[in-house]
Amino acid sequence: MPAPEPAGGRRVARVLIDSPLPQLDRLFDYVLPDELGEVACGVRVKAPLRTAGRVVDGYIVEIAEETDAARALSEVESVVSDVQVLPDRLYRLARRAADRAAGSASDVLRLAIPKRQVRVEKAWRPPEHPPVIAADALTRARDVIAAYQGLDELLAGNGRAAVEAIPGLDADSLPLWAMMLAAAAATTLGGGRSAILVVPDHRDQELLLAALQKFVPDEAVVRHDARQPNPDRYRAFLRTLADAPCVVVGNRSAVYSPAQAGLVALWDDGDPLLAEPLAPYVHARDAALLRQEQEGSTLMLAGHTRSTDAERLVQHGWLQDITAVRRVTPRVQLSTPQELEQAAQRVPTSAFAAARAAVADGPVLVQVARPGFAPTLVCAQCRVPARCAHCHGPLGARRRGAVPVCGWCGRSAHAWRCPECSSEQVRLASSGTERTADELGRAFPGVRVIVSDGRHPVTRIDARPALVVATRGAEPLAEGGYRAVILLDGARMLQAPELRIGEACLRWWSNAAALAARGAPVHLVGVNGPAAKALATWTQPAYARSELEARAPLHMPPTARVAQIEGLPASVRSAIAALSEIGVPGEAVLGPVPTDDDDERVRALVRFGYGAGAAVASTLRAAVVADAAQSRRGRGRNRPSLSVHLDILEPEI
């Protein structure tokens, strides 16, 4: 006979299994045997999984006493570590983010909790005292915050705001936006709460870390970086679990940091790098909004431009609009009508004269669309784009007179012949960073030319005269700011077949213009449309509002939410039928159509309002779980299952 249960019943742990299978995205009950001793919520455990006949990893989410001894339950096999890596606040955030995106909580937690490092964990000791910020540092932080109307009240009242950052650099050639975020973090830390600062890439992260050195002691700053070695990343994660407040600086997954946040701030939320490419594809902005609603912390979406997503929240009153007390705008000049007609002239006379005058005093920035020498070639006779004979990829040139090379497969086209006119000659159809640098080097003899792009990254330059040719987003900081900024290839950038290309171009141009010295000319070449006028008048929020008005009749994001459903035709039709049962009309569905990479799979888009978001996400998640379970039962485990992606940035059908 089994031994009788104690009067208080048995301990039961509710465990979240760490598994990518959607049907396992729920809490499982396990008995906690007495030999495990005291066990806390949030620890890693190993538990048996009956359906797979194996032991899996998981996290204890809840512990309860149960008196029903007749219920058959498996036992937790072991406790991996007594460190509570999954605090309740982190689990609730992951659960809410996953539910909103029709995904699994374990997929979200995989972004938030790094792999365990045993040596780091055993050697780790949490700080004994909270960090101390010097009084003069807090005073300087308040002075920076005072430059923005209502920002101090926002930080004190745990509000939500879209902040229009002041363009320019400080006396130490640090961006003013980084100083503003660092000052806000220092103020929050001085109040005894942690701050989480999320930026798109490592360049922004380095700038923000440099700005924080002016306000916050080094031991209070935690770096969250995907480039870190695993031990360093796990050590930083353990620091965010400690009670002592800190400032977390990192990329998109830093938004899930388990620190007790008093401030969550995102820089440049329109940058596509803040969109998570892994399931369940939760954008850092959406995770920050969920976190603010859950924890009541201050939320800041800051940028030189305003994304349409942020502007929609401002229009609905969900975000406060914060601008500078004293308006500061770059001196932007657009191409004249005569210059616009001279399409063959890449650098018009006015921009060339401005560069020649400015380069005598210091560095001049020239922004171009693409890296390389000539990324694309065309037939010299009929102007048909030159394509690779093997993969049909675009042919480009690495230098003047070089053999054309395919941009996809890398093959050299030694004997290329035009399929339209049989010509064997090609023509340079575009100019990358290297070709632009080559041309400017001949036009400005004796002036050093610096190339900065993905293959030649440059982060800082001195104040000596130079021509800096950079791709968008790769512009280095110049000591004292650039004496002139020339923005080339604007018309080509705007031709990209993307829904958000206008706001993306405005963001690229604005971020480059913000690097100019005070009063330096900024020339936008070859563009004179709404985005160009918004840059010239520095009215980016107004441009975002006009974009929202244009997209509303089409029900395109972010005026409506869009879900992408992909899978076998029967699975996609079943998911669409389930949506119709909850009231999603047929005209809201686009497709299904075959996917580009698999003839057996189809794709459909579903547009729906924000009010129906919870019902749509729940229905689609149920369809994914049902499809996965049916696949394992009878149709083959290797068959691709139904996938769902909510809130896609660029709908394609």
Image: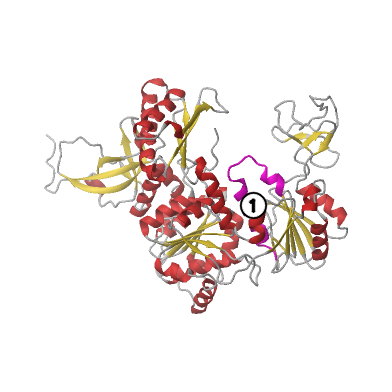
Q: Residue 189, image x and y in percent? A: 45, 68
Whole-percent x and y of residue 548? 53, 49
- Element at label 1: helix
Q: Is residue 593 above or below residue 133?
A: above
Q: Where is residue 641 in the image (x, y as percent from the top left)?
A: 44, 28
Query: Which quarter of the rendered picture does the N terminus lie within?
Result: top left
Q: How many labels does the image show?
A: 1
The residue nearer to you, when weighing 159 against 461, is 159
Q: Is residue 61 magenta?
A: no
Q: Name the spot of residue 606 as percent of width and height, x first.
A: 46, 35
Left or right of residue 451: residue 166: left
Q: Which residues are the magenta region?
A: 490-516
Who's the residue at 36% across and 28% down the image? Answer: 629
In this view of the protein, which residue sits in the foreground, 368 or 468? Answer: 368
User: Going 46% across and 71% down the picture, which residue do you hit?
Assistant: 152
Q: Residue type at mark 1?
A: Pro
The correct choice, above or below, for 625 with respect to 171 in the image is: above
Is any atom of residue 305 visible in this view? no
Quarter of the rendering containing residue 335: bottom right
Residue at 40% from the left image edge and 39% from the top image edge = 102
Q: Mark 1 points at which residue?
A: 530
Is residue 505 inside the magenta stretch?
yes
Q: Is the magenta stretch mostly helix, strand or loop?
A: helix
Residue 325 picture quarter: bottom right
For the C terminus, which image quadrant? top right
